[in-house]
Image: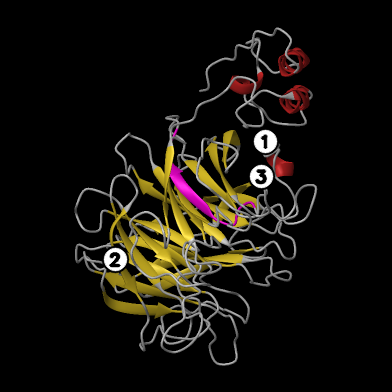
Amino acid sequence: MIGQQKISDESGGFDGQILPGDYFGYAVEGLGDLDGDGTPDLVVGVPGTDGLVGENEGALWILFLKPDGRVDRQKKFSPGTGPLAVAGDELGSDVATLGDLDGDGHVDIAVGAPFHDEEDAADRGIVWTLFLDDDGDVDEVQRFDGFGSEFDGDLAPGDQFGEATAALGDLDGDGVPDLAVGAPGDDDDGAEKGAIWILFMNDDGLVDHQQKISAESGGFAGGLENGDAFGSSIAALGDLDGDGVTDLAVGAPYDDNGPGEDLGAVWILFMNDDGTVKGEYKISKKDDHLLAELDGTDLFGWDVAALGDLDGDDVPDLGVGTPNDDQGSGENRGAFYVLFLNADGSVKVERKVSDAAGGFSGDLHAGDTFGSSLAALGDLNGDGTTDLAVGAPQDDDGAGASNGAVWVTFLEGVVVICGDADSNDAVSSTDALLALFAAVGSALCEPCVCDVNSSGGVTAVDAQLLLSAAVGLPADLVCPVCE
C-alpha cells in the first residue's frame, strides 16, 4: 500500500449526516464513473440507518469521488415510505453493480436486505434491483425473493438471502448480466452451512431462472460444516482457469479449519456456464499454509473482492477481509489480505494490510472492524494499479458509537521479499519454520519466496539460511523471480 484516505462523519470531504449505529461502510461497491468526470465512484451501505417507518431500515450513500479518494459530493438513497421501507430489513447490507441491465446507458445495482420477513418467514431476506441515472437517483426498483417476483427458489426462515451479492457478468451468454446472491443461514444438509444462488437475469431486473449451490446442490463437493455460513460474501474473479467461464470466491467466515474457532475460509469455485460447480479449492489457514497470522474469531472471508491481475501474471487476484483481526493495540481493529493467486486457486503470495502491516498508516482503534467490506474501485489515482475501498463500520468518528467509516486504500503491485514466507515484511524464525515445512511437503511456499539459495527447490538448507538471517548471522538470500 502506498497511501490511504478516510471517509467518515469527520473526514474526507463527506458532509452528509451519519448517526450512531448507522454502520456506514458495512457494504461498499465500486460504481465505475457514474457521473462521467473521469474518476470512479462508490456506493456505501448503511444498514443500521433508521427511517420514516422504523429502526434499521437501511439506506445507501452514493459518493462521487476525487482522484485523491476524498468526496466531491454525495447523495443519499433512503427508502422513504415506499416498498423498500421496512423496519429491521437492514437494506444496504450488501450491494452489487450489475452494469447497464436495462440498456439506458446508466449503471444499475442490486441491494440486499437479508433480515426482510415475508409472511411467517423471519429473516428470509430479499434483494432489490435499483435502476440508477447518472446522478445517482433511483428511477425504478424491482424485487426478487420468491414472493411477487419471478424468482422461485425455495427460501426458508433465517436464510438471510441478500447478505452477499456479486455481479457475474453474462454467465449464460444471453446478453444480460447475471447475479450471485448469498444465503449464509441456509440449512441444506445441516444448520447454517450456507448457500449461494446463481440468478440468471432478464433485462427488466427480474429472474429468468436460478441455480442453487450448497452442501447438497449445484455440484459443490467441498464439504461444509454446521455454522460455516458459506455465502456470507461472494466475488466474481473472472476466468481463473482459462475455460471461458467466470469463477467465484465465496466466504465462509465461521469455518473452524485451523487452530481455533471461526478463523474463516474462502472457497474458490470453478464454474460451469449453467451455474453449477465443476471444481473447488479451499483457502484457509490449515489448507493453504500461508495464512500464518490467522487466529480464532478473525472471520477470514467476511468479505471478498476481485482485484483483477495486480501482479501481471495473467491470473486474477483477491482481497479478503478479516474484521476481527487483533493486530495492533486493541481487539477487532481489523485487517484485510491481498492474495496473489495461482490458476488452480491456491495462494502464491499474500500481503496483509492492518494498522501494523502492509504500509497502512491510518489510525485504527479497537472495535473498528476494518475489513468488514471491500470493493475494487479501479485506478483512482492514475498509477496503473487498482485501488480498494475498505469498510470499518464500527468506527466511532462523529457523535456516537458505530457511526462507521470507509478507507480508500491506494494499492501497489506485489512486492516480494525473498524469505518473507509469512508476508509480514521481514524475515523471522517463523519464515524458517515455514520453509522447513515446505521442504518436507507439509506446507506450500513459492520458490520465489522460500528458495533462498536459488537451488531450484525449497529444501532444509533454505530453512537453515533463513534461521541464520533471522538471528542476525550473515546469510545471502537470493530467490528466483516469481513467475
Residue picked out by circle 2: 101
Q: Earlier in the sequence, mark 1 or mark 3?
A: 1
- Measuring 35% from the left and 78% from the top, which residue is drawn there? 142
Instruction: Evaluate whether residue 245 shows in this view.
Output: no
Element type at marker 3? loop
Element type at marker 1? loop
Q: CA distance from mark 2 to mark 1?
A: 40 Å
Residue picked out by circle 1: 290
State yes or no: discs 1 and 3 in contact (Cβ < 8 Å). no
Judge by depth and name the residue closer to the eye, 306 or 199.
306
In the image, is residue 347 part of the stretch drawn in magenta? no
Dot label at residue 188: none
Percent coordinates x, y for residue 218 in the rendering: 58, 62
Query: Which amino acid is tagged 1?
Result: Leu
| Magenta region, residue range | 300-310
Percent coordinates x, y for residue 339 in the rendering: 55, 39
What colouring method underlies this structural image? secondary structure
Judge by depth and name the residue closer to the eye, 38 or 221.
38
Q: Residue 480 appears in which quarter of the rendering?
A: top right
Residue 126 position (above or below residue 227): below
Query: Which amino acid is tagged 3?
Result: Gln
Q: Earlier in the sequence, mark 2 or mark 3?
A: 2
- Measuring 65% from the left and 57% from the top, which residue is drawn there? 253
Residue picked out by circle 3: 327
